Amino acid sequence: MTTTESIATKGQTTARSEASPLTPRSTPDLDAPALVAELRTTFASGTTKSIAWRKGQLKALRRMLVEREDDILNALASDLGKPNIEAFVTEIAFVLTEIAVALKNLDRWVRPEKVRIPATQLPGKGRIYRDPLGVVLVIGPWNYPVQLLLAPIVGAIAAGNCVVLKPSEVSPTVSATLSAIIPQYLDNSALRVVEGAIPETTALLAQRWDHIFYTGHGSTGRIVMAAAAKNLTPVTLELGGKSPTYVDASANLTVAAKRIAWGKFLNAGQTCVAPDYVLVHRSVEAELLKKLQEAVTQMYGVNTQETPDFARIVDSRHFIRVSALLDGEGAGTPFFGGERDASDCFISPTVLVGTDPESKVMQDEIFGPLLPVLAVDGVEEAIAFINNRDKPLALYVFAEDKQIAERVLDSTSSGGACINGTLFQLVPPTLPFGGVGESGQGAYHGRSTFETFSHHKSVLKKTTRLDPPIAYPPYTERKKKILRRFL
Ligand code: NAD
């Protein structure tokens, strides 16, 4: 029997369970100091520095994703009702691409980088070495629990580190599945999974790490950063926030509606870069609303609870949270949607109109399938609205007028942005992905992940063949004159 065969699943992909039969698994016998000490011994042995080891582990990770695809997809269906294809593309295929990029480029990435040096240091050579950091901690969230735990470790392994992975307890089936299969494929002396919730994460955070990579909410991000500060441990914080979308009067409304609806309702809105709300030019508001409804009907049908292509809210705690936003004062009224079924953690794709900008649904990150659409009188009002709030993780502009798009990019600050699309900015491995301000710090994907988990060691190589006395005391007026000419 596979790890997840016995687990009933959410949504329509397989039989729907009332509640996941798995409770968050804890690690009562976790000895965090001993675990870290063990991995430090492995790191000190030099095993993980070998390029052959790194490539071998990346290939093993790839083999795991291919051979255990069904186990992983079943776990994702169980925890989030993730549609099969959606889960494959956004979780498994995403990590496979990261592995392919790392395997293809690793020899080049690890080569000391040649840099120019000033004439005063000639003859000599300037080089930047990429050293592994050591023993690192990767803490994942529940919304893309495979991608967001494994994509960081692709770079951590490629850079030659030992890693402890902490999957989220909120997606317990994925957590249990990964903790069961990872040791079957990866080198257990260097890569470990620790399951559990706050007590385990707290115990892990109390250790000295060489880097902590955290994905999740900013409130926990602050706890992570405070714990890291005690040991001067560098952190990457991949956080969330309210990502705005501006739809200009010049926009292609049919395409905009489809791309906004897709980006918003994918994974039932539980995507860190989902368009959180829409600011639409008043002159095209009615048309956009109509097209959003058409797009949702086209993608999910009329009865969205029946379709196998729409995910579920992860658990009843988050169902209650999103419901409260929908019911909250000033949330506005559904232009369409608003249906709920607590027993299935189901909330239908919902577009809200008449939303008060000061309401809770416009203050908290929604992280669910609710999309407030607010009319503005033009791009300047949209820019002022966005700049009045925390810096978002993503920003979307739909406009055929290129100057409008540039104006928004130029006048706002966000982790990333996409013009005439949503979420796609995550796809090219050449584009570093990360937040700014409240939406996080640091970036990854492709080479950036490797760089995040590497120390950039500057090395100057000198020759002893020449040793001019000019730099040494005694300092003389003549030396000063010559030095002034060179420096
Ligand atoms: P979560 O509750 O699963 O927390 C993430 C991790 O933090 C878990 O492993 C959990 O055990 C740990 N944790 C939670 N509370 C803790 C505490 N008090 N002390 C120590 N550890 C603790 O996930 P979440 O935070 O609900 O995730 C959703 C948030 O993550 C959203 O804000 C979303 O926007 C953001 N997010 C960001 C990205 C990104 O790439 N920037 C991706 C996905 C999600």
Image: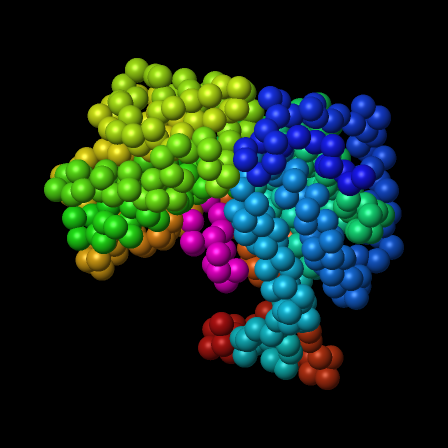
The one nearer the camera, 72 or 190, is: 72
Side of 275 where 382 appears, left or right: left
Give the main secondary structure, helix, strand or loop, of the magenta stretch: loop
Q: Is residue 141 visible?
A: no
Span shown in magenta: 423-439
Q: Position of residue 58 (x, y in %)?
A: 72, 59
In the image, what residue occupies the spot 42% across and 54% down?
Answer: 424
In the image, what residue occupies the spot 28% across and 38% down?
Answer: 293
In the image, what residue occupies the spot 59% across and 60% down?
Answer: 97
Q: Position of residue 449 (x, y in %)?
A: 59, 55
In the image, what residue occupies the spot 51% across and 31% down?
Answer: 312
Q: Position of residue 11 (x, y in %)?
A: 54, 33
Q: Is residue 294 visible?
A: yes
Is residue 28 shown above or below 407? above
Is residue 486 shown above or below 154? below
The one nearer the camera, 297 or 28, is: 297
The one nearer the camera, 269 or 217, is: 269
Outermost residue, bottom direction? 465
